[in-house]
Image (cartoon, helix red, strand yellow):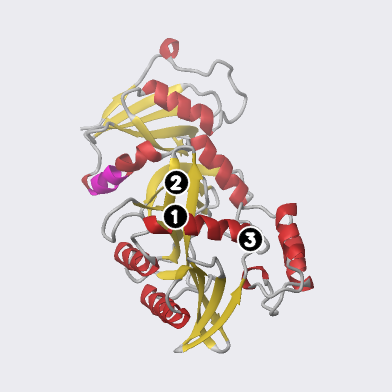
């Protein structure tokens, strides 16, 4: 049974300062939470009822037995009504998944609105709600054009791309194809060489599996392009941030029990039929310790782009795994810090004229003017 609660004028909840226009989502979120303190806010929207525009909240108790829907006047924040009902049975499983991941969320509704507005270059938000997107707890932000929807990772704040069938998407290959390329590259290089990165590429000559390997003993790097059963290898000495990466790999390789092939297999189980763009072993050292993960960039069968993270320090089948919005690399971000600065420029200049595939951004065969142009085009 649905219950409607109405308050008298004297008991209305209003903002401390009455606004002459839209009170905005942040204020409306606060009103919803203050009105239903026993509930968790999972969504809020602007909606017109009886010729009056208002903000309507969507709150649930932890047991998922009660659904509250407070409504406030959009321009003044005045309380209008409170609907109380039981959750729809068809929504329970999704709500349970949302509640399970809520403790990990670091963003709130206002953060999601800001991130979505930045991504869409719009400000006419109509609805913000939690939703599960390919295993990621996200804010789904919808706009009044009834077309634009932006999905914001509730942990990282990154945008989760949803592609259409005709969109231009980064090249992907099945996990098994990449795993076969990695195995062939490692066999070609021989003992002591280990793959820590693989990338999909499609060129006129066909499908290319690009494998990056390091030598555990010497610290040398190699780039292996696998086309069918042909392997073309370029060996080179690491420099700058590459040298730091190799040093981290050498220092922590003994802790890696899930190799690249196992990470690909785990991804295939989690996201059947997904295409993989690239995989890389990430070593992050903080005060709390060192974490070692495989970051697997994929496009799901539903054309959702995301990064799947697989713990590299536990045997296949165990360990922490999670998905996040994709970490999109910019051409020229040599040190991988997310922006292009003088540090990246110095690495290009230090290896000017050298053969170094990771810094050969234009695939000319050496580091030169073309690579510098690409870097400067993305300069921040």
323 or 214, which lies in front? 214
- The mark nearer the N terminus, 2 or 1, is 1
Determine the residue located farthest toward the front in the rendered image: 217
Looking at the image, can residue 176 be seen? yes
Report if the CB atoms under discs 3 and 2 are less than 8 Å apart.
no
Name the image quarter holding residue 372: bottom right
Q: Is residue 84 left or right of residue 49?
A: left
Q: Is residue 2 left or right of residue 142?
A: left
Residue on which disc 3 sits:
330
Camera-near label (3 vs 1) is: 1
Q: Which mark is residue 290?
A: 2
Q: Residue 308: x percent and y percent?
A: 41, 58
| Region rendered in magenta | 90-97
Q: Residue at x 42, y 27 (%)?
A: 32
Report if the CB atoms under discs 2 and 1 are less than 8 Å apart.
yes
Q: Is residue 34 left or right of residue 111?
A: left
Task: Check the image and report above or below for 320 versus 114.
Answer: below
- The mark nearer the N terminus, 3 or 1, is 1
Q: Residues within 10 Å of mark 1 (few under 14, many from 20)?
A: some
Q: CA distance from mark 3 to mark 1?
A: 27 Å
Magenta segment main secondary structure: helix
Secondary structure at badge 1 equals helix
Q: CA distance from mark 3 to mark 2?
A: 26 Å
Task: Check the image and report above or below for 342 versus 353.
Answer: above
19 or 292, which lies in front? 292
On-image quarter of the N terminus:
top left
Q: Residue 274: x percent and y percent?
A: 38, 69
Q: Residues within 10 Å of mark 2 (few under 14, many from 20)?
A: few
Q: CA distance from mark 2 to mark 1?
A: 9 Å
Q: Residues within 10 Å of mark 3 (few under 14, many from 20)?
A: some
């Amino acid at each position: 049974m649905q219950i409607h609660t109405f308050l008298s004028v004297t008991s209305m909840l209003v903002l401390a300062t009455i606004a002459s226009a839209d009170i905005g989502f942040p204020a409306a979120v606060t009103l919803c939470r203050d009105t239903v303190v026993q509930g968790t806010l999972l969504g809020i929207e602007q909606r017109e009822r009886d010729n009056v525009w208002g903000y309507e909240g969507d709150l649930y108790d932890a047991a998922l037995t009660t659904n509250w829907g407070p409504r406030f006047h959009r321009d003044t924040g005045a309380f209008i009504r409170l609907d109380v009902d039981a959750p729809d049975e068809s929504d329970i499983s999704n709500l349970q998944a949302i509640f399970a991941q809520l403790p990990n969320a670091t963003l709130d509704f206002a953060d999601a609105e800001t991130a979505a507005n930045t991504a869409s270059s719009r400000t006419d938000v109509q609805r913000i709600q939690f939703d599960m997107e390919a295993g990621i707890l996200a804010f789904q932000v919808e706009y009044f054009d009834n077309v634009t929807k932006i999905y914001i990772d509730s942990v990282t704040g990154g945008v989760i791309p949803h592609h259409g069938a005709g969109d231009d998407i980064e090249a992907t290959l099945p996990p098994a194809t990449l795993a076969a390329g990695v195995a062939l590259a490692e066999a070609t290089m021989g003992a002591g060489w280990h793959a820590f990165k693989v990338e999909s590429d499609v060129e006129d000559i066909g499908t290319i599996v690009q494998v990056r390997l390091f030598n555990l003993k010497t610290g040398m790097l190699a780039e292996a392009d696998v086309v069918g059963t042909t392997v073309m290898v370029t060996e080179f000495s690491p420099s700058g941030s590459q040298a730091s990466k190799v040093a981290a790999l050498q220092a922590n390789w003994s802790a890696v029990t899930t190799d690249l092939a196992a990470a690909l297999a785990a991804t295939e189980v989690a996201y059947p039929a997904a295409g993989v763009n690239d995989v890389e072993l990430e070593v992050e050292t903080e005060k709390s310790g060192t974490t070692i993960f495989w970051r697997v960039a994929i496009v799901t069968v539903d054309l959702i782009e995301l990064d799947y993270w697989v713990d590299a320090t536990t045997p296949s089948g165990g360990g922490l795994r999670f998905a996040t919005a994709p970490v999109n690399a910019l051409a020229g971000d040599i040190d991988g810090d997310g922006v292009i600065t003088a540090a990246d420029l110095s690495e290009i200049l230090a290896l000017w004229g050298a053969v170094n595939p990771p810094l050969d951004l234009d695939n000319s065969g050496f580091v030169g003017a073309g690579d510098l142009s690409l870097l400067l085009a993305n300069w921040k």
